[in-house]
Image (cartoon, helix red, strand yellow):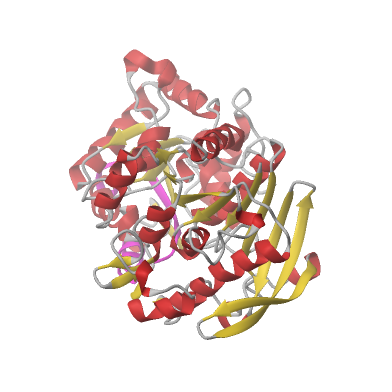
């Protein structure tokens, strides 16, 4: 198949979250399975300063109809292989900024214009580059307008799109792109598209809703998340829309994979020692290095709990911070946290750091090297998320022989098999379901008990996790099946 993948971010060029990881790894996996994949994304010169040297200019003056005028953009290409290319829409007015979507926590006021323009430019680039996609694959609200355009007279008569079907992947339904309806004129579409079956949402534009309603297939990034977003608790008011899509048989849940080359304890360049599931000695050296790096006493016997996370309510870090204080006082354990985010949460974690300096350490910021070390050096990895569309860190953890302790939601529910002595061969972690201080404390104490008193069971859980296949090739095969279903 010929696949055009449209995204607002992709690693390593620009990244704010899991969308960037998926937009790097899944197109690569699909291309390796014989598909020709063209990824289209904005060019953010301040975010990825070395990109120009790695790209070639493919189209110097790309005409983009926009509102009552025509704007001019450039298209640059970074060719990865014969089957995979990244194309960048360069338009400095909208994309030459210090960050992708906001500045110091405040959304750019022209985000509606920015991503209407990007979607229209992506469609124009398909024509200019003479791509002939079988599948137009959009991701979240920032590229959802491409799905709408495909179903309008603006594009349906072009040979490039004659046999094209559209897909949208929901990475996080909490972000929908809701804007004033007067931005519609920028798109070149008439008011007939401002209705309940397309863009209209409480008298505003909703990019995500329209992208879902106009897609031939819709998928969420895990099977459980696909079910959750059809409920009021997780659907962020779009649950009726998703119920309708599901009733039509057009909603799927496909679990993300991980890059098993990047995340491999046997070859990881960031680790002081290497190891694998059959030779675990190197993990002890990683634990000692982690304790030293975070200023904690080096002790091979104490259980270490790690967290790498955006410090936000969604991630449940507030609940963890409340629950852990009692254990810090009563138990012999250590906690290391790497992340940044909510200032109130940061303040509470700093308070715990000061009160229990030999047991609790927090690094406010992000370091790729440290994130690998936390995964490798911890005994347990904690993810108490309120909701988690897929989650990657629990899979990284299992790959590194670090047992995940998670709240059973979204992809966490799908990837972690709760410890059961009667089903030890399948157990890969510990789960709780109610987000409360008591549930978190009890689960952590349960894990500590297995660590201290049942070492053989602990080792078996570690081994099971390390032996689990989270490759993108498995995921890519499921996307292929969904693409084929779009034509039925």
Q: Is residue 172 something that shows in the picture?
A: no
Residue that extends furthest to the top in the rendered view of this protein: 422
Relative to 104, is 288 above or below? above
* Relative to 182, 61 lies left or right: right
Q: Compared with residue 280, is residue 273 higher up or lower down, i.e. above or below? A: below
Q: Is residue 461 left or right of residue 164?
A: left
Q: Front-most of 49 and 134?
A: 134
Say if residue 363 shows up in the picture. Answer: yes
Q: Nearer the viewer, residue 323 or 53?
A: 53
The residue shown at (61%, 65%) is 122
- Residue 383: horizontal and vertical position, in percent? 37, 45
* Between 306 and 88, the one nearer to me in the picture: 88
Q: Is residue 329 magenta?
A: yes
Quadrant housing residue 345: bottom left
Q: Residue at x 38, y 44 (%)?
A: 382
| Location of residue 82 in the rendering, given as x and y in whole percent from the top left corner | 80, 47
Residue 214, quarter of picture = bottom left
Q: In the rendered picture of this protein, how many numbered marks are placed on residues? A: 0
Is residue 401 found left or right of 439 in the rendered image? right
Query: Is residue 288 covered in magenta?
Result: no
**Which span is picked out in magenta?**
328-351
Please say if 451 is above or below 11: above
Q: Measured from the top left, where is residue 337 in percent x and y?
A: 43, 54
């Amino acid at each position: 198949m010929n696949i055009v993948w449209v995204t607002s971010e992709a690693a390593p060029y620009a990244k704010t979250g899991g969308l960037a990881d998926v937009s790097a790894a899944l197109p690569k996996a699909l291309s390796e399975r014989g598909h020709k994949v063209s990824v289209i994304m904005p060019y953010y010169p301040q975010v990825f300063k070395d990109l120009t040297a790695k790209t070639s200019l493919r189209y110097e003056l790309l005409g983009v109809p926009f509102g009552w005028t025509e704007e001019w953009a450039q298209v640059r290409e970074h060719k990865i292989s014969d089957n995979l290319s990244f194309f960048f829409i360069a338009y400095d007015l909208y994309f030459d900024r210090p960050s992708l979507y906001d500045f110091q926590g405040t959304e750019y006021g022209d985000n509606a214009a920015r991503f209407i323009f990007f979607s229209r430019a992506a469609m124009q680039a398909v024509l200019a580059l003479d791509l002939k996609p079988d599948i137009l694959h959009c991701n979240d609200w920032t590229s959802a307008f491409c799905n709408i355009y495909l179903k309008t007279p603006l594009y349906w008569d072009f040979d490039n799109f004659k046999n094209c079907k559209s897909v949208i992947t929901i990475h996080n339904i909490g972000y929908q792109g809701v804007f004033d309806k007067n931005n519609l004129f920028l798109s070149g579409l008439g008011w007939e598209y401002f209705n309940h079956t397309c863009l209209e949402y409480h008298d505003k534009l909703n990019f995500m809703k329209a992208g879902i309603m106009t897609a031939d297939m819709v998928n969420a990034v895990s099977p459980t998340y696909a079910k959750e977003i059809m409920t009021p608790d997780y659907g962020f008011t779009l649950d009726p829309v998703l119920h309708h899509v599901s009733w039509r048989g057009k909603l799927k849940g496909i679990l993300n994979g991980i890059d098993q080359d990047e995340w491999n304890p046997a070859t990881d360049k960031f680790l002081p020692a290497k190891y694998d599931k059959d030779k675990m000695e190197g993990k002890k050296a990683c634990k000692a290095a982690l304790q030293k790096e975070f200023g904690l006493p080096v002790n091979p016997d104490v259980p270490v709990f790690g967290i790498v996370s955006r410090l936000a309510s969604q991630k449940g870090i507030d609940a963890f911070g409340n629950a852990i204080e009692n254990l810090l006082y009563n138990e012999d354990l250590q906690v290391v946290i790497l992340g940044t985010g909510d200032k109130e949460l940061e303040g509470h974690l700093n308070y715990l750091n000061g009160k229990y300096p030999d047991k609790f350490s927090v690094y406010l910021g992000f370091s790729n090297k440290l994130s690998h070390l936390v995964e490798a050096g911890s005994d347990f990895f904690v993810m108490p998320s309120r909701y988690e569309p897929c989650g990657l860190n629990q899979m990284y953890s299992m790959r590194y022989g670090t047992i995940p302790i998670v709240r059973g939601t979204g992809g966490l529910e799908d990837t972690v098999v709760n410890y059961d002595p009667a089903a030890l061969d399948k157990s890969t972690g510990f789960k709780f379901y109610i987000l409360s201080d008591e549930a978190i404390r009890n689960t952590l104490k349960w894990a500590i008990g297995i660590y201290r008193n049942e070492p053989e069971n602990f080792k078996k859980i570690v081994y099971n996790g390390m032996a689990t296949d989270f490759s993108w090739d498995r995921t890519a095969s499921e996307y292929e099946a969904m693409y084929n279903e779009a034509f039925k």
